[in-house]
Image: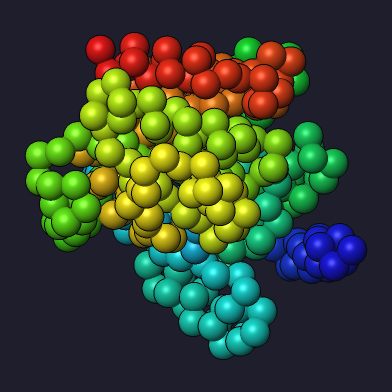
Amino acid sequence: MMKKVERFAKVALARFVARFLRVEKIDASEFSRIAVERLLVIRQHNQMGDMLLAVPAFRGLRRRFPGARITLVGSPINSLVMENNPYVDEVLTYAKHRSRRDPLELARFVGELRRRRFDAAIVLNTVSFSVTSMLLAAASGARLRIGSTSAPFGHDLTSRFYHLELPLPSVDELARMHESQHNLYPLAAIGVRESDLGSLLVPSEADRDAARRFIAAAFGAEAPFVVCHPGAGKKQNIWPPERFAELVRQLYERRGLAAAVVRGPMDRETMDAFLAASARPPAVISCPSVGFLGALMERAALVLCNDTGIMHIAGAVGARCVALFGPTDPARWKPVNESVVAVRGVNGEVVSVTVAEALEAALRLLG
């Protein structure tokens, strides 16, 4: 209920602000003749996976604007995966919860944006429409505001805010499209082209050093190991944790692979069941940083997980990964990286995947 009230209030605020905006429309050909030296990209979808699937869009923007300084605004959850990314020069985190508590925090953030004097702001919305992102683009003071149309989401707001509205695919087109292509689709209107749909995450050297120290202490510096995350944010995406434990046991017996298991902030019940069913006590890592986790996966023989953000981190660092899928279509949402193999349950039920099926995929990846 509160979310509905909040969204209604934001839409009402946007309609009020629109009365004072002067928006002279341009077309894509006019935009192609404008020099862009400072580019703001706003993407606030609150999932790490969504941001990593948008990496090809940032790669394409870097190719399209090779000399521009690109600043990304993300949320506290998803901006972390873009640290050290070669396709953006700067990552700013907009924390809505802090701005609600302290209006001065919002004023400071807007001031930071305006001091950068952006030539253009692009709001990269695909799976949902963010009123907040659109308002931030207006508040940034960028000379041009560009973004995906809000029409498919039942609003005409973007027509009042953006100098150039970008198209989104039809329902039929989207059904045949990988999500990384979905992110690129609106940008094609401004000349952004990219064929490499691979995601990318770059751990820092400090993260890699920490991972090396952890591995040496837990397993021995050269010992092979698997990283397992039996949890997921959505209950329907969780493969039974007892089967994860059995899969880990069989990989130890067949290949001598020790296990590091990752515990997320919402994984207590799942983790308890996994540990109770484990034949050997694994090394438990609680709520690790994104960079450390990526660095650990880089050195792992294999990653085992559900359809969740961990899978996208594994794909983005090039780790070999077996991901268990249920209702979500891996053709649309699995990282395109060939190192990530999806095993999907019958009729979209992840519980229908057997340990034998997951083990076969794991052994095939291990070669």
Could you say where residue 4 lies in the image, as x and y percent from the top left? 86, 60
Q: Position of residue 271 (x, y in %)?
A: 53, 51
Q: Is residue 126 above or below residue 157?
A: above
From this viewpoint, is residue 164 visible? no
> Which quadrant does the N terminus fall into?
bottom right
Q: Is residue 104 left or right of residue 234?
A: left
Residue 36 placement, left or right of 332: left
For image coordinates 26% across by 32% down, the residue present is 257
Residue 21 screen position, x and y as percent: 69, 63
Q: Is residue 189 above or below residue 262?
A: above
Q: Is residue 299 visible?
A: yes
Q: How is the image coloured?
A: rainbow
In the foreground, 179 or 234: 234
Q: Measuring from the top left, give residue 166's x and y in whole percent.
A: 61, 34
Q: Looking at the picture, tell me which residue is in the foreground, 284 or 160.
A: 284
At x 48% / y 19%, what residue is drawn? Answer: 358
User: Residue 249, located in which quarter of the rendered image?
Assistant: top left
Q: Give the residue drawn at x 85%, y 67%.
A: 2
Q: Is residue 289 above or below residue 17?
A: above
Q: Is residue 219 above or below residue 306?
A: below
Return the residue nearer the eye: 212 or 177. Answer: 212
In the drawing, does residue 180 fall left or right of residue 115?
right
Q: How many marks?
A: 0
